[in-house]
Image: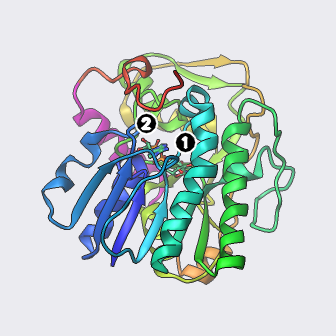
Amino acid sequence: MRVVVSGGSGFLGSHLCEALLRRGDSVCALDNLSSGRSVNIAPLLHDPRFAFEACDVSEPFTVSGHVDAVAHLASPASPVDYQRLPLETLAAGSRGTENMLRLADRHSARFVLASTSEVYGDPTVHPQDEEYWGHVNPVGPRSVYDEAKRFAEALSMAYRRTRAVDVGIVRIFNTYGPRMRSYDGRVVSSFIRQALAGEPLTLFGDGSQTRSFCYVDDMVRGLTAMIDSHRPGPFNLGNPGERTVRELAELVVMITGSDSGLRFLPLPVDDPVRRRPVISRAREGLGWRPLVPLEEGLRHTVEWFLAQPRRPVRPSEQSRVGRPS
Ligand code: NAD
């Protein structure tokens, strides 16, 4: 297969490109490097089956050659990124999604949308299955991301219904692993960075809010299963093992052997209190389930962080591509 992966130099996208190449596919990665890093795909550039195009998928672009599948992952994804790039986030969910859907339509290709558990907002139903329609504040600080993804889902289903595009939607829950950026504002990378630096780990609220953390290898197996399927979903992809943020902090301190303490700050606006996916649909529809236990995945992630150059890149030093002028 030849698969076009938007967001291919990001955290998940680069792992997906690698996995597709490993199983024999050809890959064309599109990315504007607004939150992705070229170092993530540098080893893939030597493979003749891999191509990289620097482009903004919210603007017109061309992909030459045939296309069998399109995986649309391009979007600012961490709270730090989508609050730094609010208009670009809305554009990636709307115009970007439509451009990728048109590409799939032109080639009669499979289209997979990387949606998010954020479509459930701060859920009033627990755990969350795909029948739940969500509890999203449409004007809050997280809305640019949540509503962009909700729109992207609606647009994708409209292309499936009216143009018979082979659309599939996955709703990704918190995923962690190597290649997360130290300052992306996500809880796992923040805790690891702080623990390795011997700084206090920052918890918001009292740390009793819960999240479900999925290791990146498990997530990539779910994404490839969805690319290979013809099912529409939506399917929740995530690890149903629910942990409090405080438990996560204590686990990171234990694994890193750090003597860091904990520091408590006020809970951000609209921060979801509980998150846990019901994954029975993905189990039945894709034959998928996560396999990597949290402690094992965290150990791999910490090892990767330890192997990186000493000084992490701060947000102010990141690429300015895609920033509002
Ligand atoms: P990431 O920021 O590492 O990757 C996103 C990539 O998209 C980056 O490489 C970025 O440069 C690129 N990008 C952004 N806007 C673009 C545009 N207009 N044109 C071209 N490229 C663009 O984030 P990630 O964690 O790898 O997330 C990948 C996808 O998975 C996103 O769509 C995100 O919403 C979804 N997702 C991720 C998680 C998670 O826990 N990692 C959870 C839910 C959903």
Element type at marker 2? loop
Q: Is residue 253 above or below residue 135?
A: above
Q: Is residue 299 magenta?
A: yes
- Main SS, magenta residues: helix
Identify which amino acid the numbered label 1 is placed on.
Ala
Q: Is residue 303 above or below residue 133?
A: above
Q: Tell me residue 136's x, y (percent).
A: 81, 44
- On the question of residue 234 being in view, the answer is no
Q: Tell me residue 232's x, y (percent).
A: 64, 77
Disc 1 crowd, CA 10 A, few/some/many (<14, 14-19, 20+):
some
Q: Is residue 91 above or below residue 182?
A: below
Res 67 quadrant in image: bottom left
Q: Does the CB distance between marks 1 and 2 fall below 8 Å?
A: yes
Q: Is mark 1 within 8 Å of ligand 1?
A: yes
Task: Quickly name the residue at label 2.
Answer: 35
Identify which amino acid the numbered label 2 is placed on.
Ser
Q: Is mark 2 within 8 Å of ligand 1?
A: yes
Disc 2 crowd, CA 10 A, few/some/many (<14, 14-19, 20+):
many
Say which residue appears at 70% left-offset and 45% top-offset. 146
Q: Tell me residue 293's x, y (percent).
A: 47, 58
Region in magenta: 289-309
Element type at marker 1? loop
CA distance separating discs 1 and 2 = 8 Å
Task: Quickly name the residue at label 1.
Answer: 77
If you read the primary sequence from the N terminus, does the residue marked by circle 1 or circle 2 appear first? Answer: 2
Is 136 left or right of 72, judged from the image as shown? right
Is 216 left or right of 122, judged from the image as shown? left
Q: Tell me residue 176's x, y (percent).
A: 46, 47
Is 281 left or right of 182, judged from the image as shown? right
Q: Nearer the viewer, residue 47 or 307?
A: 47
